[in-house]
Image (cartoon, helix red, strand yellow):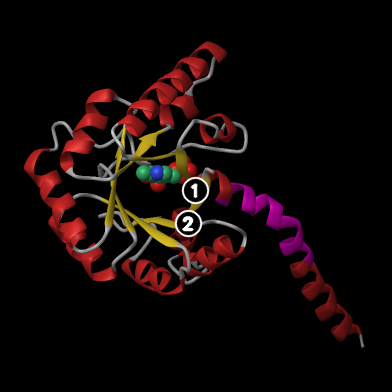
């Protein structure tokens, strides 16, 4: 059975736009779990553009399923993870100027720094997953690094526009997923998955978990908007009625 782990980063993006306290990703994390998410994913970026240290620590406290912390493989981030102890640490590449994670981690060229990060996290009792492109060398490299899980980057599939290109990207994901399974690694996937494209990836044999963020938070804006407008209108109407009496 493929499960869903919701990434709540973009609740924090909205909060950071005003620099205040709302909306709180901690509350979002709790709601996602109540609604059926098997856990919660957050990406603590070096530039702290959305999720803050405080969010990760509080989400750690409230999460009942697993906490998946996406992070760069730096010494500082590994120290933070060892302190907070998420169930899973997903190592991702990070570039300051990028809008979102672009491309998978270069495990093959990652060398000693990556292996050391994997070793330290594992020694601290944290399961390590590597966010990689659906590429045989990267998958084999992941196995060599000591990680026990991978998350295949579904961005190229999500961005494909023609039917031929979508099918081609799906075929790559299916083929490389098979290699992941054959090497005994746990198979996860994510990035760019939405209400239109998720099912084909969820149906890949052996797919354990999908990390989905932006599309769910975007949908929540619209599914919650009518009730939010009605509530504000009710307050305004009530205030007007009081003035008239
Ligand atoms: N997986 C990884 C490794 C990511 O970096 C992201 C984006 O933070 C996601 C999954 C979720 O992607 P999206 O927000 O497009 O669903």
Q: Residue at x 22, y 30 (%)?
A: 140
Q: In this rendering, does residue 106 appear at all? A: no
Q: Residue at x 38, y 69 (%)?
A: 60
| 29 left or right, relative to 83 | right
Magenta stretch: includes residue 47:
no
Q: Residues within 10 Å of mark 2 (few under 14, many from 20)?
A: many
Q: In this rendering, does residue 16 appear at all? A: yes
Ligand 1 neighbours mark 1 (CB distance < 8 Å): yes
Bounds of the magenta span?
217-230
Q: Nearer the viewer, residue 3 or 28?
A: 3
Q: Which residue is mark 2?
A: 8
Classified by dominant secondary structure, the portion drawn in magenta counts as helix
The quarter of the picture where residue 145 lies is top left
Q: Residue at x 75, y 62 (%)?
A: 227
Depicted 73 relative to depicted 12: above or below: above
Q: Nearer the viewer, residue 15 or 147?
A: 147
Q: Position of residue 237 (x, y in %)?
A: 84, 73
Q: Could you say whether the residue bearing mark 1 is in a helix, strand or loop?
A: loop
The reply to whether dot 2 and dot 1 touch (C-beta < 8 Å) is yes
Q: CA distance from mark 2 to mark 1?
A: 6 Å
Q: Nearer the viewer, residue 217 or 60?
A: 60
Q: Position of residue 93 (x, y in %)?
A: 25, 42
Residue 99 image label: none
Q: Which residue is mark 1?
A: 213
Mark found first going from the N terminus, 2 or 1: 2
Q: Nearer the viewer, residue 144 or 31?
A: 144
Count numbered badges in the picture. Answer: 2
């Amino acid at each position: 059975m493929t499960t869903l782990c919701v990434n709540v980063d973009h609740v924090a993006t909205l909060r950071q736009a005003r620099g205040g306290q709302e909306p709180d990703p901690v509350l979002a994390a709790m709601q996602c779990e109540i609604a059926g998410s098997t856990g919660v994913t957050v990406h603590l970026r070096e530039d702290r553009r959305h999720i803050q240290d405080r969010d990760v620590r509080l989400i750690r406290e409230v999460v009942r399923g697993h906490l998946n912390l996406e992070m760069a493989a730096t010494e500082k981030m590994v120290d933070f993870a060892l302190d907070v102890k998420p169930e899973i640490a997903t190592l991702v590449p990070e570039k300051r100027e990028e809008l979102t994670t672009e491309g998978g981690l270069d495990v093959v060229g990652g060398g000693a720094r990556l292996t050391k990060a994997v070793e330290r996290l594992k020694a601290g009792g944290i399961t390590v997953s590597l966010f990689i492109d659906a590429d045989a060398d990267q998958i084999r490299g992941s196995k060599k690094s000591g990680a026990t899980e991978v998350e295949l980057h579904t961005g190229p599939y999500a961005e494909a526009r023609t039917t031929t290109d979508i099918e081609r990207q799906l075929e790559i994901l299916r083929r490389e997923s098979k290699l992941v399974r054959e090497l005994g690694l746990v198979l996860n996937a994510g990035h760019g998955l939405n209400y239109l494209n998720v099912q084909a990836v969820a149906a890949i044999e052996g797919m354990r978990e999908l990390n989905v963020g932006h599309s769910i938070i975007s949908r929540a804006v619209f599914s919650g908007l009518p009730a939010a407008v009605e509530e504000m209108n009710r307050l305004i109407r009530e205030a007007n009625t009081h003035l008239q009496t």
